[in-house]
């Protein structure tokens, strides 16, 4: 299990999250090093500390907030190396609920976003960490592509996911991980929250479709009355029929788009996470966590204690010689 990974994981997150930001378009609001003002306020309240500007929060407290609120909450110490990093990074960027949904979808569980005993048991039972990481990241990227802010921050989110996937896979296989990509300047540190994800079809097309659908529905109601149509010219009758068909098709299209978006938000859609998404970005090398075997320190054997031997006095030497001579004389 990955009981030694938090320090290394936190260093990676710090690279992704960058410094201070207060972007009106960022749903996270005022944020410092990945910690929002709201999260910082809640942490300080739990620990009986007064509120301060998150920009002035200590590095130790930021690390403690991430560990308490995300790493420990998701039981990352009990997960395989690499899996812990992916879950942790997704929590920081998109919240524990979304991270849980992607994990549940990849594990074939009921997707409800609640991290319970069944989800934890399934995560503990992962046999192929690399396979899980690939699927988890694909679901994460697909969901973020449905965000209202994808056009604004999508390049950064995609680079972050691709880079984190490669690092997590390296942790899982014991290979040397690549450097951590710096994504702050392209929006990779911006938060993704559930309210930011589209729950209805995007862009203007569904609006037009909905309009046609309304017309078609009205036409369908009119067409339902034979008495209303029997005296209408054939061309008008065909117009009513055409609008009815358009209305039915529009309704079906809207339903398909809504269902697809719901599946995307629940982690049911996959998107390829290309290794090139983080290409050309500045990067920082962060050491991989040590393995538990390598981390075991063996205390050096203590040097043997040898009692000092006192040098004999001249008198003792003379006495010893005389004794020796007496012993060797014949009787």
Image (cartoon, rainbow, N blue to C red):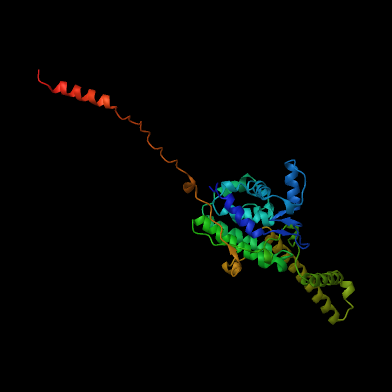
* Screen quadrant of the C terminus: top left
Q: Is residue 104 visible?
A: no
The structure residue drawn at horizontal position 56% and vertical position 49%, both measured from the top left corner, is 79
The structure residue drawn at horizontal position 74% and vertical position 69%, both measured from the top left corner, is 253
Q: Count of labels shown?
A: 0
Residue 114 position, x and y percent, is: 68, 49
Taking depth in this image into account, of 326 and 149 the one nearest to the observer is 326
Q: In the rendered view, tell whether residue 59 sits above or below residue 216.
A: above
Residue 40 position, x and y percent, is: 73, 49
Q: Is residue 297 left or right of residue 9?
A: left
Taking depth in this image into account, of 315 and 153 the one nearest to the observer is 315
Residue 258 position, x and y percent, is: 73, 63
Residue 61 position, x and y percent, is: 68, 47
Q: Is residue 300 left or right of residue 25?
A: left
The furthest residue to the top: 331
The structure residue drawn at horizontal position 73% and vertical position 50%, both measured from the top left corner, is 39
């Amino acid at each position: 299990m990955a009981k030694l990974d938090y320090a290394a994981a936190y260093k990676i997150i710090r690279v992704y999250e960058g410094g201070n930001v207060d972007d009106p378009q960022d749903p996270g609001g005022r944020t410092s090093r990945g910690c929002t003002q709201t999260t910082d306020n809640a942490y300080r309240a739990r620990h009986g500390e007064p509120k301060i500007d998150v920009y002035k929060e200590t590095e130790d407290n930021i690390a403690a907030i991430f560990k308490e609120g995300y790493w420990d909450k998701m039981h990352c110490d009990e997960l395989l190396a690499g899996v812990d990093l992916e879950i942790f990074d997704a929590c920081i960027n998109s919240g524990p609920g979304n991270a849980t949904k992607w994990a549940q979808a990849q594990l074939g569980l009921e997707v409800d976003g609640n991290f319970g005993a069944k989800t934890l048991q399934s995560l503990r039972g992962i046999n192929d960490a690399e396979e899980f990481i690939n699927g988890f990241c694909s679901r994460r990227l697909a969901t973020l592509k449905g965000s209202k802010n994808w056009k604004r921050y999508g390049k950064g989110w995609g680079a972050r996911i691709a880079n984190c996937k490669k690092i997590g896979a390296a942790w899982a296989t014991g290979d040397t991980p690549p450097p951590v990509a710096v994504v702050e300047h392209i929006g990779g540190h911006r938060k993704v929250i559930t309210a930011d994800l589209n729950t209805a079809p995007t862009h203007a097309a569904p609006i037009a479709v909905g309009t046609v659908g309304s017309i078609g529905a009205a036409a369908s109601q009119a067409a339902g009355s034979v008495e209303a149509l029997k005296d209408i010219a054939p061309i008008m009758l065909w117009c009513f029929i055409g609008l009815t068909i358009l209305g039915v098709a529009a309704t079906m299209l809207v339903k398909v788009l809504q269902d697809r978006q719901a599946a995307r938000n629940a982690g049911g859609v996959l998107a390829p996470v290309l290794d090139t998404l983080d290409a050309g970005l500045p990067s920082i090398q962060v050491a991989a966590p040590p393995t538990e075997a390598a981390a075991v320190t063996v205390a050096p054997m203590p040097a043997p204690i040898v009692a000092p031997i006192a040098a004999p006095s001249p008198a003792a030497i003379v006495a010893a010689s005389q004794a020796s001579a007496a012993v060797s004389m014949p009787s």
